[in-house]
Amino acid sequence: MIADLAADQGVWGPGPGDGAAVGAAWEALRTVMDPEIPVLSVVDLGMIRGVEAGEGGRLRVRLSPTYSGCPATGIIALEVARALDAAGFPNAEVVTEVAPPWTTDWISPAGLDRLRESGIAPPPRGAGKRALVAPEERIACPRCGSTDTEVISAFGSTACKALHRCRSCLEPFDSFKCI
Ligand SMILES: [Zn+2]
């Protein structure tokens, strides 16, 4: 039930009533990686809120920015348009949608696995906005799983990540900053 709800909010693919063109567009969108977190596609991040075929088959893609003011958002919209163009949808319209606001809970389960595999601590499920109030909250080390970790810097290798250190294995690691 919770998984269904998450899939519902994160979207991640075409719906049952969508045609082949919309399906092909989703496949193209899966190749657009986040410039800051290159192991995650915009689909896995839950940034793609919907793909619709409008009049004359023109596609409309609704895109949710991850962090408001994240400088990568403009680049991502361009990359999305470019990927759709390459997939045979030259006039796709990319619309930015700010409500409801994006949350880390929209990241797909596969995306969370890829974060972990690449040494970035994934955000805890349901952490969403809570983490803003408690930035010192313990994040599990992606290498050894220990929760005996500390925040070294609220800003990691990019503005969307925070830098932590594990007190068990002493390794520093990035976490995906929650909003
Ligand atoms: Zn560790």
Image (tube, rainbow, N blue to C red):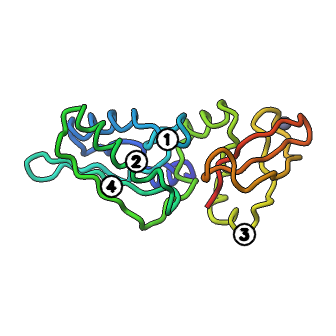
Left or right of 141: which side holds 103?
left
Q: Earlier in the sequence, mark 2 or mark 3?
A: 2
Q: Position of residue 80 (x, y in %)?
A: 33, 43
Mark 1 C-beta to ligand 1 under 8 Å:
no
Q: Earlier in the sequence, mark 4 or mark 1?
A: 1
Q: Name the amino acid type tagged 1.
A: Pro
Tell me the residue at 44%/43% (across/down): 42
Sort mark 3 into few (<14), some (14-19) or many (20+) by Cα contacts within 10 Å.
few
Q: Nearer the viewer, mark 2 or mark 3?
A: 2
SS at circle 3: helix
Sort mark 4 into few (<14), some (14-19) or many (20+) by Cα contacts within 10 Å.
some
Circles 2 and 3 in contact, beta carbons < 8 Å: no
For this orientation, the residue located farthest to the right is 168
Mark 2 C-beta to ligand 1 under 8 Å:
no
Q: Which residue is mark 1?
A: 35
Q: Nearer the viewer, mark 4 or mark 1?
A: 1
Alpha carbon distance from label 4 to label 1: 19 Å
Q: Which residue is mark 2?
A: 75
Q: Name the amino acid type tagged 4.
A: Arg
Tell me the residue at 63%/65% (across/down): 129
